[in-house]
Amino acid sequence: MTDTTDIVIQVDGLTKHYGELRAVDGVSFGVRRGEVFGILGPNGAGKTTTLECIEGLTEPTSGATTVLGIDTQREPQKVKERIGVQLQASAYFDHLTLKEILDLFGMFYNRRIATFELLEQVNLADRANTTVNKLSGGQQQRFSIAATLVNDPEVVFLDEPTTGLDPRARRSLWDFVQSINSEGRTVVLTTHYMEEAEYLCDRIAIMDRGKIVALDSPDNLVRSLPVPYRIKLGEECAERITELRELAGVKDALADENGARLMSSDASVTVPALMNWATESGVNLTHLEVVPSNLEDVFLSITGRALTE
């Protein structure tokens, strides 16, 4: 059981309706101090609206949200003093330099981090006198996150932080998010990238059509699948499907022109059984590949649709 004193964000029965549309529909969860918590789901799932309600930027239709023990609807300004928020789309003054923007933002808070310390943290100290529109996409995203850290927040909210970035810039930003977390900050992020959620998050809430349909660590979500592993075999196994179906842990076996595929509930059980079978049957295995399932498979299993649909 989680110690309730360790919960820094609590969401209970959160709903947000826009006319007939239920953007958020009865969402409840808690976020633990010091973790990276992800909300994963397709576009339109309600991720951004959920974050905006928690941050005190949007008034919910019903439900309660607290951050660091503060009611975000009753005392939104008090919450904003202690959190950092990176919105899905950020706009800055085109004529101000990075240094001037951070200096300006810092004036809004009683507590702040020095401007050049922030710029050094995001590897932009040499661009201090540059305007945002002259930065690359990855640099702009790093600066956007730096701007959320001006007040040295205890909790950082990142809404789709790597959308539109190339793979190299995305991975660089992942490392930066981990560095923020390693400093003791709690991080809450939304994403529709399965790999991002698996790489960064301690726990993930999978959201679909305004509801949370699953919540656990990435590993536990994958292990919850009836067949969390696929084992690919060569052509020599295609005609031995009946025998392969009898191996320990195998839930199903299929054959095609490329060979055989086993659906296993536990690869650590199936692989040794497969090797014993091959030895006893005189079968020379030309190909053996264990492919673990991922969060895409979890989403498909729960909703019947692919995450990217």
Image (cartoon, rainbow, N blue to C red):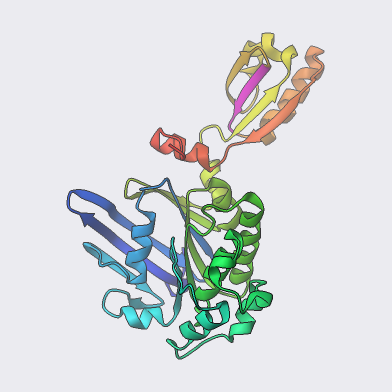
State whether residue 34 appears in this view: no
Q: Residue at x 37, y 79 (%)?
A: 79
Magenta stretch: give its range. Answer: 259-265
- Report the magenta stretch's main SS: strand
Q: Is residue 222 above or below residue 263?
A: below
Q: Position of residue 195 (x, y in %)?
A: 58, 47
Q: Is residue 122 above or below residue 102?
A: above
91 or 39: which is nearer to us?
Answer: 91
Residue in view at x 72 percent, y 24 percent = 274
Is 133 situated left or right of 278 in this image? left
Q: Is residue 82 above or below residue 280?
A: below
Image quadrant holding the C terminus, namely top left
Q: Quadrant of residue 61?
A: bottom left
Work out which residue is located at the far front of the displayed protein and give it.
95
Number of residue marks: 0
Residue nearer the viewer, 33 or 125 = 125
Q: Residue at x 68, y 12 (%)?
A: 238
Q: Looking at this rendering, what residue extends furthest in the bottom direction?
A: 110
Left or right of residue 72, residue 267 in this image? right
Residue 161 position within the rendered picture, expressed as x and y whole percent measured from the top left: 51, 59
Spot the residue most to the left.
19
Seen at 32% across and 65% down, the residue is 53
Q: Is any part of residue 64 visible from this angle?
A: yes
Residue 219 forms part of the magenta stretch: no
Q: Choose between 135 and 272: the one closer to the eye.
A: 135
* 309 to the left or right of 72: right
Quadrant in the picture for residue 172: bottom right
Task: Quadrant for residue 50, please give it.
Answer: bottom left
Q: Position of residue 15 (x, y in %)?
A: 26, 58
* Image x and y of residue 81, in percent: 41, 83
| 260 within the magenta span | yes
